[in-house]
Amino acid sequence: MMNGEYNNCYMYDVNYTEIMAQGKVMADPQWPKVKCRHGWSYNYTEIPYSTVATEQNWVCDDAALPTYAQSIFFLGAIVGGLLFGWVADRYGRIPALIGTNLIGLFAGVGTAFANSFWEFAAMRFFVGFAFDNCFTMMYILVLEYVGPKYRTFVVNMSIAIFFTGAAYCCPGLHTLWPIGSG
């Protein structure tokens, strides 16, 4: 306990064998403190699998790294939107759609193999780079193939029907294939 509160990021830098031999049972707040050196134990009750944050020990001083990675993802989405919008106008929607899907595929797989924060952040940038654009390109492509009279119905209803249908199936899929099952 430090300052009346437990601290998960620091430990006392003392010889615990000597402390116990002296019969002390309470910690002295004046003892020197160091960062924890014996690793971390994670509670997998709520999320029954490891994440990049638990695998890389992004705790204490590094606890903000997942937030930074998510911000980098959205920066990638901004850059990708600008670039793929230009590619779609210049070279066509289909090449842009194929490009976004390929970049998303390789960056998504690369994310699983990232061994450092910067590798992970770079992969998240490229996933963000492709993420919104593969949906947007497909949406615009369908919009261009349908005549003006039917655009609202075809585009909006097709998305509404398939999104709603998929959302409806998700709870059932979870019971068939629960997260964390071996």
Image (tube, rainbow, N blue to C red):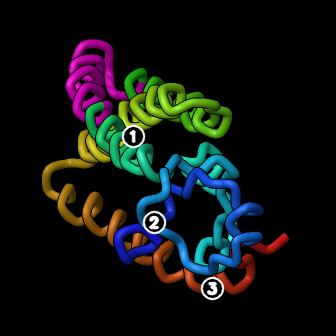
Going 56% across and 78% down the picture, which residue do you hit?
Answer: 26
How packed is label 3: few (under 14 Cα within 10 Å), some, or many (20 or more)? few
- Residues shaded magenta: 76-94
Q: Is residue 145 visible?
A: no
Q: Earlier in the sequence, mark 2 or mark 3?
A: 2
Image disc number at residue 31: none
Image disc number at residue 7: 2
- Look at the numbered disc 1 and give the secondary structure of its residue: helix
Give the overall secondary structure of the magenta segment.
Answer: helix
Q: Is residue 141 left or right of residue 110?
A: left
Seen from the viewer's position, the closer of residues 120 and 133 is 120
Seen from the viewer's position, the closer of residues 174 and 33 is 33
Image quadrant of residue 75? top left
Image quadrant of residue 50? bottom right
* Disc 1 target residue: 69
Looking at the image, residue 77 lies above or below residue 24: above
Q: CA distance from mark 2 to mark 1?
A: 25 Å
Q: Is residue 32 left or right of residue 113?
A: left
- Look at the numbered disc 2 and give the secondary structure of its residue: loop
Instruction: Please state which amino acid type lies under the numbered disc 1.
Output: Ala
Going 24% across and 31% down the picture, which residue do you hit?
Answer: 81
Looking at the image, residue 169 lies above or below residue 8: below
How packed is label 2: few (under 14 Cα within 10 Å), some, or many (20 or more)? few
Image disc number at residue 172: 3
Q: Position of residue 51 (x, y in %)?
A: 61, 54
User: Is residue 71 inside the magenta stretch?
Assistant: no
Instruction: Please state which amino acid type lies under the numbered disc 2.
Output: Asn
How packed is label 1: few (under 14 Cα within 10 Å), some, or many (20 or more)? some
Going 29% across and 17% down the picture, which residue do you hit?
Answer: 87
Q: CA distance from mark 1 to mark 3?
A: 31 Å
